[in-house]
Image (spheres, coloured by chain):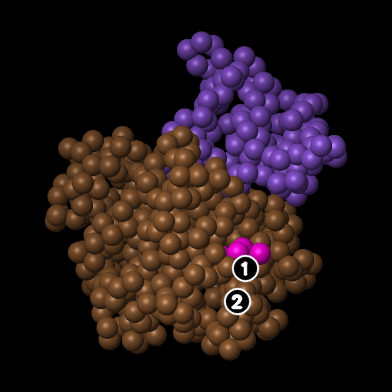
Amino acid sequence: MVPKSALRKISPIVWEIPRSYRSDMRVPARVYASQSMLEHILLDRSLEQLVNVATLPGIRKYALAMPDVHEGYGFPVGGVAAFDMDEGIISPGGIGYDINCGVRLLLSALTKSEVAGRNAEIGKTIYREVPSGVGKGGMLKLDLKEIDAVLRDGAERMISLGYGFPEDLERIESGGKLPPADASCVSEHAKSRGADQLGTMGSGNHFVEVEYVSAIYDEAEAQRMGLFRHQICVMIHTGSRGLGHQVATDYIRMMNRSLASFGFSLPDRELACAPFRSHEGQSYWKAMSAAANFAWANRQLITWEIREAWKRVFGAAESLDLLYDVAHNIAKIEAYMLDGEKKNLVVHRKGATRAFPGQPVLIPGSMGTGSYVLSDCQHAMEASFGSSCHGAGRTMSRTKARRETDASELLRELSEKGIAVQAGSKAGLAEEAPAAYKDVDEVVSVVTGSGIAKKVARLKPLAVIKG
Amino acid sequence: MPYEILEHTADVRVRVHAATLVELFSDTVQAMNEILDPTLPQQAETVTADISVEAPDVTALLIDFLNDVLLQTELQRTTFRDIAFHTFTDNALLATLSGSRFECLRCDIKAVTWHEADVRRNSRDEWETIIVFDI
């Protein structure tokens, strides 16, 4: 564990672990957190994991932790790190197994009063339409040729098959497609795991949530985005499913066998990595891009399924427009100013959201509490490699959450708040209890207080759909 | 119990210990099955799968083996209770898994991570390691 005495206060919400803390650190580590949040962060291994990230070859400026940071494996969840393209690495463990897990928000033209009393009906209809849980296959069973097309073209492939509109693509990070994708770098095993999983949510912390806009903080920006008070929205949170998990597994295995040949000695084998320019690094980059494309195709097909459910409940005239889709487990090549020079860097986000100027930043809170839409992220380009938090962040283990949560009582409490719940398992529901997460308002206040982004709107849930 | 589930903020951390390496490998699969928590039909179909792994060291052998078991679990929709090792060294194994096809799983394990994995002798002269499962 990193002791509190190792941290230097840069500002009331920015803390630094200097390079001198451990001899193998190449850069300092910085944490965005309030004093009270920091006390909690110090209780698990988040900061030890962040220090490990700071030792990786070619890392630039800082290893960063967003305020929703918590213990993960390899990188902490909420971790951001940028690496030089020539001297630095790419690390599958720095992106995680759920490649391009992300969030998308759909906007309806309906208001809260227009859907009053229909929460449960909406929830049930979406639950029937979007397969969830473990081992549940989706509506499409893809052969290898068709999977390769999805891996190459991402969300665009779904649009060409009729599962969405061309304008959807303009509202997805990177247009829902990373061009370096190469399906030949993805194993047959990974493709087999993904063959029937497009259009499926999975389990764990993945969800679909029907929400309404409970507060607007920036009228002009909200209007630009098409958000208005009491508007009904739908949030989707899922990723690349088994295909992405297998891509990460395959490449972490491969890179662990190559570490000695690169001369790397790592503090954690989960941080297995390869020089970005190496054959291994490039193969993973192309495979990760393909898995990211699969995730965008997945969220696109789920969008189509939800649009079908919406028509069933509200009639064919009611539509759902895509506001935006963000990835939060991914590596991207992005340009930043370093020492007065513009440099392309390999930015790793593990449980962190891209936050670029002009882009909506979507921050889901814990089940039943609410979410945020943020924007105006100019300072993020200087302070956090264009990154923000990705959610509230866990603060309690799943076993403790199950032990301390009465799922029936939780359902009753949510019902009293007017929230309908459709969940595959009560134990799974208890693991995701709001008490197991940080306060999303406090997390977002650190992001806005640091100037990384500004609040546009807050959303509150009406129906939660989980596997 | 040959394993105990420890606290981890987001995932599942398990400490496994056993008198022999073969038992350690088998017990870790049972820990994985407990986390997956399958629902089996009354007349569950028996499924077998062969797994062959080569690795640079015994920790890598365990992680690669577990990930291959997890892959078969997902592809064959089967949790494997019985494992027969035909070959077992610190660097290689050949095993036949046998188990029951499930209806559903309560928990999704995305992968078996390398984080904190370190197969070694403990102070009681048993084989021991921590395994963190990404869920």
Q: Residue at x 55, y 84 (%)?
A: A319
**Quadrant of the drawing holding the N terminus of chain A:** top left
User: The chain coloured brown carries which letter?
Assistant: A
Question: What whole-number distance in Å separates the C-alpha atoms at marks 2 and 1?
Answer: 8 Å
Residue A124 drawn in magenta: yes
Q: Is residue B17 above or below residue A272?
A: above
Image position of A395 with respect to B90: above or below: below
Q: Give the chain letter at badge 1.
A: A
In the rendered image of this protein, does residue A324 appear above or below residue B91? Answer: below
Q: Does residue A463 appear left or right of residue A354 in this picture?
A: right
Label 2 neighbour load within 10 Å: few <14, some 14-19, many 20+: some
Which residue corresponds to mark 1? A125
Q: Is residue A189 left or right of residue A435?
A: right
Q: Which residue is mark 2?
A: A313
User: Which is nearer the N-term, disc 2 or disc 1?
Assistant: 1
**Residue A206 magenta:** no
Residue A239 percent coordinates (x, y): 56, 61
Q: Magenta segment, which residues?
A: A123-128
